[in-house]
Structure formats: C-alpha cells, structure tokens
Amino acid sequence: MKDLTDKNEAALKQVLAETGRELRDLRRRVAQQDLKNVRAIRAARVTVARVYTILRHINNKTDSKPD
C-alpha cells in the first residue's frame, strides 16, 4: 500500500491498466484450468480496489477548496 500512495495519478492509472490486464489473463487461465494459484485473482482485485481508493482520495483532495 505504501508504494501505491507514493505514486502520482498518472502512475496509478498505469498500475490500474496493468493490473486489469493481469486480472483478465488470470481469469482466462482459470477458465482454461491452467492456473494453480487462484488466490492471485483476489490479490489483483485488491490491488485494483486500492488504486481506485487512492485515486478517489487524490481527486477529493484536489476538488476541495479552502474556505
């Protein structure tokens, strides 16, 4: 989580895209019964959720205006 919070918005979007491709590949491999470690899917989903959470936090921080 620490390494994700240190990244900027563009880098987070790239991580999101890469993890999405990895998740698609993992799901395909499960369908083909080629994947032994099915928990890798959960790890990829958690990473995607963390990135979305951090991006939402960044956007909320930039949207809020000081009084």
Image: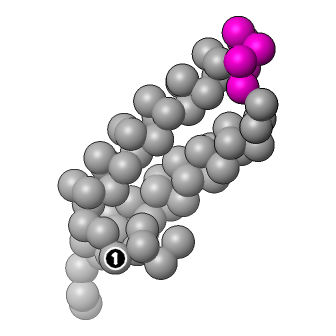
User: For residue 6, which quarter of the picture?
Assistant: bottom left
Label 1 secondary element: loop
- In the image, what residue occupies the spot 72% across and 26% down? 35
- Mark 1: which amino acid? Asp
Taking 46 as reference, is 1 above or below it?
below
Q: Quadrant of residue 7?
A: bottom left
Q: Position of residue 33 (x, y in %)?
A: 77, 14
User: In the rendering, at what x and y percent does residue 4 appear?
Assistant: 42, 68
Residue appearing at x 26%, y 57% in the figure: 11
Which residue is the site of mark 1? Answer: 6
Residue furthest out toward the bottom: 67
Q: Residues within 10 Å of mark 1 (few under 14, many from 20)?
A: few
How far from the left and from the top, in percent, is residue 50? 54, 59
Query: Horizontal and vertical percent for residue 9?
Result: 26, 60
The reply, left or right, for residue 67 in relation to residue 36 is: left
- State yes or no: residue 34 in magenta: yes
- What residue appears at the point 22 percent right and 55 percent down from the top-left corner? 10
Please report the bounds of the magenta region as a residue range.
30-35
Query: Which quadrant, please, contains the C terminus?
Result: bottom left
